[in-house]
Amino acid sequence: MDPLKQRIMEYWTRRADSFCDQRMRELVDPKRERWLAELQRYLPKDGGRLRVLDLGTGTGYFAFLFAADGHDVVGIDLTAHMIEKAKEASETLGLPVDFRVMDAEHPELEEASFDVLVTRNLTWTLPHLPAAYHEWYHLLKPGGVLINFDADYANYAELNDPDNLPENHAHKNIPRDMSEENDEITMEVAAYQQPRPQWDVQLLLRAGFEQVHVDNGIWKRIYAEIDEFYNPTPIFTLVAYKAEK
């Protein structure tokens, strides 16, 4: 495995248990309905059953939102312990999701087999983002949509310093060595990337997507309160559509 990916996987292995607990709490928080509203902006309006791929699913938060609405969902993540926690949560919630350990940059899945690809806070960790977007394009059915929630974390690193976070923020209690490791990973991955989301728009168009939209307003809509779920970095939404054929 690529040394950087190995480092990322080891970091998230250590974070998986507490991360899962936080995401389970978020499933019963008002942010659940806010995330659903954001997703529904871009989903087909016919209300049909969709086949959804949650890339970098972590412990399954978005996968569960889609499964609860009756869609067929696959969730993949590079970190095995994250997938273990996601499977446990699936049983607890009674929401069936096909969780698999898999590299999101090289998903071993059938081409043109998904209506929706969704991802949250994943692409900033990918050292080969141009190749990933190319792979994801081919996973979508004609007329399918990629919904990517992310941020340019490398340019806002100081906002995520534990000393600058509110007292009730979950990341406030992350051990200092893990916080420093996250910062080092962030800057190492940033060496492979360019300013975002402008760079992403170019990459998505090159990958073959027909329409690409950016929404910089989502951050204020989701994070209206400063609580344990608050993200101090302004997130954006990237939405990219594959042409109908």
Image (cartoon, rainbow, N blue to C red):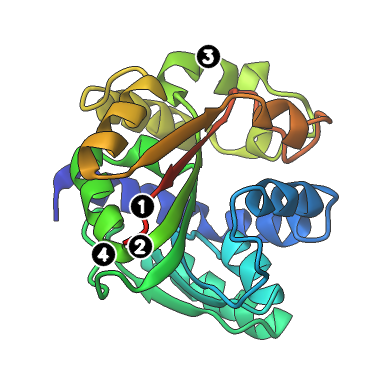
The percent position of residue 158, horizontal first and vertical second, equals 53, 14
Which amino acid is tagged 3?
Answer: Glu
Task: Return the disc, 3 or 1, that comes first in the chain's sequence.
Answer: 3
The percent position of residue 19, horizontal first and vertical second, equals 59, 54
Residues marked 2 and 4 touching at CB (< 8 Å): no
Quote the CA–CA distance across marks 1 and 4.
18 Å
Task: Return the disc, 2 or 3, that comes first in the chain's sequence.
Answer: 2
Query: In front: mark 1 or mark 4?
Result: 1
Quick check: can you spot residue 128?
no
Which amino acid is tagged 2?
Answer: Pro
Q: Residues within 10 Å of mark 3 (few under 14, many from 20)?
A: some
Task: Return the disc, 3 or 4, that comes first in the chain's sequence.
Answer: 4
Which amino acid is tagged 4?
Answer: Pro
Residues marked 2 and 1 touching at CB (< 8 Å): yes
Tally of numbered discs? 4
Which amino acid is tagged 1?
Answer: Lys
Mark seen at residue 158: 3
Judged left or right of residue 150, residue 103 is left
The residue at 74%/37% (across/down) is 222
Q: Which residue is mark 1?
A: 242
The residue at 42%/25% (across/down) is 197
Q: Which residue is mark 4?
A: 107
Judged left or right of residue 141, residue 163 is right
Query: For the residue labelled by badge 1, is the local secondary structure a helix, a strand or a loop?
Result: loop
The percent position of residue 227, horizontal first and vertical second, equals 80, 35
Task: Return the disc, 2 or 1, that comes first in the chain's sequence.
Answer: 2
Residue 12, relative to residue 211: is it above or below? below
Q: Residues within 10 Å of mark 2 (few under 14, many from 20)?
A: some
Quote the CA–CA distance across marks 3 and 4.
33 Å
